[in-house]
Image (spheres, helix red, strand yellow):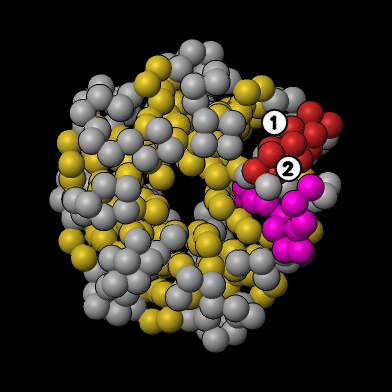
Amino acid sequence: MLFAFMLTFALAFAGAPPAEAQGRSGLWAGLVKTKGYVVGSPLALSGLHRFDGDTTWSHVGWNIPRVSGVSFDPHDTDVIFLAAGNGALRTIDGGRSWKITTGWEVTEAQDIAVDPRTPEHVYVATAYGVWRTRDRGENWLEATAELPEKYTQVVAVDRSQSGRLLIGTWGGLYVSEDAGESWELAGSAGIPVHDIQQSRSDPDTWMAGTKDHGVLLSDDGGRTWRSAADDVDGRSMLAVAIDPFDEANMAAAGWDGIFLSTDGGREWEKRTAALPVAESYEIVFDAAEPGRLWAATVEHGIFYSDDFGTTWQYAGLNGALVFDMIFIESTPK
């Protein structure tokens, strides 16, 4: 079965021509079309997708079974990086052409992050540790010194300080103040971490989604962490999000559904009654439309809500498993 899957991967990767990108701003998603897939059959258009409005999405780039993470240069949105099964991919022309920037030693990439203040510096989280580049992906070096747990699910760069990183591993949360030269345990020792996010309006506010331990919160830049309310404690949260317009609004998603808080994580409510299924894999607040929340259900499509989860509108991609959603936005030079 594994051989058949890898053969399908190779054929899809080599045979699909890159799509034209028509504008980089807006919502993008890394996904795989899983519903009804039979091992050995041609792969449906999977990989990077751009939301075009209503329920329409455009496939951009190569046909890849899994894109786990998406990041970009805010000063040049033609530059996009992907974390994929066989390493870190990069486009410098908005998706018209792509290059695998890593070598054979970097595989099973889970997440990727461009330093917004120093965009030549990029970090990739893999099943075997963290790697970094200081020249936009031309050369990569391992950055896992002092990390007792190598499996790294998520990496994030502090927006307020270049070179300051937070990662979520299968052994807890770690922070680096020196661009990955050294690491220090920050919280959740021994607890697998699925996702970490930083508030855009308050850079000291961070949240993390964990396996079987709910949501963790930090109000000191990720140096220390505490458990959120009992409403979400003990649950597995695959994705978390903080409203860019109001850090008091938070969201968490997992197999148990979508949970929302309007008071900075003190109290939570489940808001999945209007969705076709409770199981959700990814969630993100809209970067341009205040109050809008996007959720990716498991194989039933992406939905958005303008009333904090009371009602949901279908936005396409039925049959997909979405690993990452981001809003690509440009920063004035």
Using the image, determine if residue 27 lies above or below residue 213. Answer: above
Which image quadrant for residue 264?
bottom left
**SS state under label 1:** loop
Determine whether 202 is above or below 157 in the image: below
Asked if residue 151 lies left or right of residue 16, the reply is left
**Residue lying at 25% horizontally and 59% vertically, measured from the top left:** 217
Near mark 2 (Cα within 10 A), the count class, few <14, some 14-19 or many ≥20, is few
Say few, some or many: other residues with alpha carbon within 10 Å of mark 1 (under 14 / 14 to 19 / 20 or more).
many
Q: Which of marks 1 and 2 is nearer the N terminus?
A: 2
- Which of the two residues, 76 or 298, is positioned nearer the viewer here? 298
Which residue of the protein is positioned furthest toward the bottom in this rendering? 273
Say which of 71 and 323 sits in front.
323
Q: Tag 1: residue type?
A: Gly
User: Taking the image as drawn, is residue 326 in sight?
Assistant: yes
**Left or right placement of residue 189 versus residue 292 in this view:** left
Looking at the picture, which amino acid does disc 2 mark?
Ala
Q: Give the range drawn in magenta.
A: 27-40
Q: State how far apart marks 1 and 2 are (Cα).
A: 32 Å
Write the residue at 55% across / 45% down: 68
User: Residue 35 colored magenta?
Assistant: yes
Judge from the rendering whether residue 254 lies leftward or rightward of residue 94; answer left or right.
Answer: left
Question: How many callouts does the rendering have?
Answer: 2
Front one among 162 and 301: 301
- Residue carrying label 1: 94
Q: In which quarter of the image is residue 186?
A: top left
Residue 4's disc is 2
Tell me where residue 106 appears, x and y as whole percent: 49, 26
Badge 2 marks a residue whose secondary structure is helix
Q: Position of residue 107 (x, y in %)?
A: 52, 30
Q: Residue at x 72, y 47 (%)?
A: 46
> Closer to the observer: label 1 or label 2?
2
**Is 120 placed left or right of 315 in the picture?**
left
